[in-house]
Image: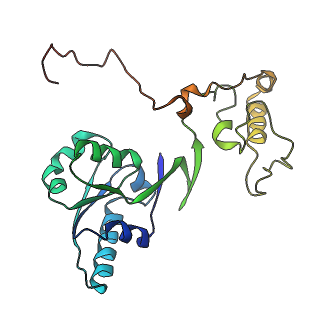
Amino acid sequence: MIVGEQKSLAEIKEMLAPYNKVLILGCGTCVTVCFAGGEKEVGILAAELRMARQLEGKPLETAEATVQRQCEWEYIDPLKAEIEGADVVLSLACGIGVQTVAERYPQVRVLPGLNTKFLGQPQEAGVWVERCAACGNCLLDKTGGICPIARCSKSLLNGPCGGSQNGKCEIDPNVDCAWQLIYDRLKALGQLELMMEIIPAKDWSTSRDGGPRKIVREDLKLEIPAGGDK
């Protein structure tokens, strides 16, 4: 899941200072799970903003909506009137959702209410941890299902650095050494021979270093007649 964290009220207030009518738009998937941008958070934030602006003598008109996913046009299209009728949209989605709304409604100012943090996993109540760096070339088959790109502080591909001690990373004694976890997992699976394979230097062109990425499935593309519409 994409893990996000709501910006501070002070920062959000500053972004909204020039506006009098805001649509606070939540997202019903990832950021709902991490309690950052779901319907409940939309309602709480709207109330906080109204009270804060009222105390300043600058009343703020708020509208609230939450869609299943902000990252797909089909879910935000039904809100066309609400979006275009607001002075500004405050999106409580990840950065993808913010950009999707802005792209679909280019005449409307869309602001981010969250900071998108990482691709992660809920570990326990109120705790999310990074598990994937979306590097575009997965090697979990070689590492026992544990990602060294995301979970090793140095993204090492062929074993631990010299700083790990007692199974912990040198950056923090509370952080597990990813390569210790990989070793333990491969040992439990009876596949320690995989540790002997040399993983070549990573081709980062499949990651963000290669520029904005795009996937095209030719088998799923619609056949569009010349001059026709989708």
Q: Is residue 165 visible?
A: yes
Say which residue appears at 30% left-offset and 86% top-offset: 55
> Up-down: is 50 above or below 5?
below
Count all numbered tags in the image, as a single digit. 0
Residue 50, picture quadrant: bottom left
Task: Give coordinates of residue 169: x percent, y percent.
Answer: 78, 49
Judged left or right of residue 111, residue 157 is right
Say which residue appears at 25% left-offset and 60% top-offset: 88
Task: Say which quadrant the C terminus sits in.
Answer: top left
Task: Give coordinates of residue 76: x percent, y percent.
Answer: 23, 46
Indicate the colouring scheme: rainbow
Judged left or right of residue 157, residue 47 is left
Of the pair 99 and 186, the residue shown nearer to us: 99
> Up-down: is 197 above or below 178?
above
Task: Give coordinates of residue 69: x percent, y percent.
Answer: 31, 46
> Up-down: is 118 above or below 202?
below
Q: Is residue 137 visible?
A: no
Residue 140, picture quadrant: top right
Looking at the image, the residue that sits furthest to the front is 18
Task: Give coordinates of residue 94: x percent, y percent.
Answer: 41, 50
Of the pair 57 and 137, the residue shown nearer to us: 57
Judged left or right of residue 60, residue 164 is right
Say which residue appears at 68% left-offset and 37% top-offset: 148
Residue 186, picture quadrant: top right
Say which residue appears at 31% left-offset and 71% top-offset: 17
